[in-house]
Amino acid sequence: MKVGLIYVVFGKEFDILASHCVAYSREFTKLPIQIVTNIPQAQRCGKWSSIDNIHFTEVSMSDCENRRVKTLIDNYSLFQNTLYLDADSIIQKSDFDEKILEYFDN
């Protein structure tokens, strides 16, 4: 995949928060989304099931190890060009697509 969004979502509270933020953001972007999480699928918020074009990468780490993933995000990303967003970020611009990454270094 060429371009996508990535979130690091560790802990149940952030799982709930991120699922709602990503669901709302999906109204404004069709870019693929990757979630790097330490929450097993069976324990994730049910809201995730209503979001399309999303991929989960599950890691076996404690909640306090999220910074390790964030600082090495390029090692986890499925995309050639990646935009990292915090779990509480919401996209609110119509047609948020791969052109947004033209403004940043590759």
Image (cartoon, rainbow, N blue to C red):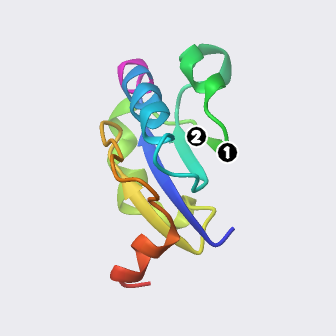
Q: How many marks?
A: 2
**Residue at horizontal 58 percent and vertical 26 percent from the top:** 48
Q: Is residue 104 visible?
A: no
Labels 1 and 2 touching (C-beta < 8 A): no
**Residue at horizontal 63 percent and vertical 62 percent from the top:** 78
Secondary structure at numbered mark 2: loop
Mark carried by residue 53: 1
| Relative height, residue 55 to residue 31 (above, below) | above
| Relative height, residue 9 to residue 103 (above, below) | above
Q: Residue 51's spot in the image, x, y percent?
A: 61, 32
42 relative to 6 in the view: left or right? right
Q: Nearer the viewer, residue 67 or 28?
A: 28
Q: Nearer the viewer, mark 1 or mark 2?
A: 1
- Is the magenta region chiefly helix, strand or loop? helix
Is residue 42 highlighted in magenta?
no
Residue holding disc 2: 59
* Mark 2 neighbour density, 10 Å: few (under 14) some (14–19) many (20 or more): some
Residue type highlighted by circle 2 = Val
* Mark 1 neighbour density, 10 Å: few (under 14) some (14–19) many (20 or more): few
Q: Residue furthest front?
A: 94
Span of residues in magenta: 11-15
**Residue at horizontal 41 percent and vertical 82 percent from the top:** 102
Q: Residue 64's spot in the image, x, y percent?
A: 33, 35
Q: Is residue 12 visible?
A: yes
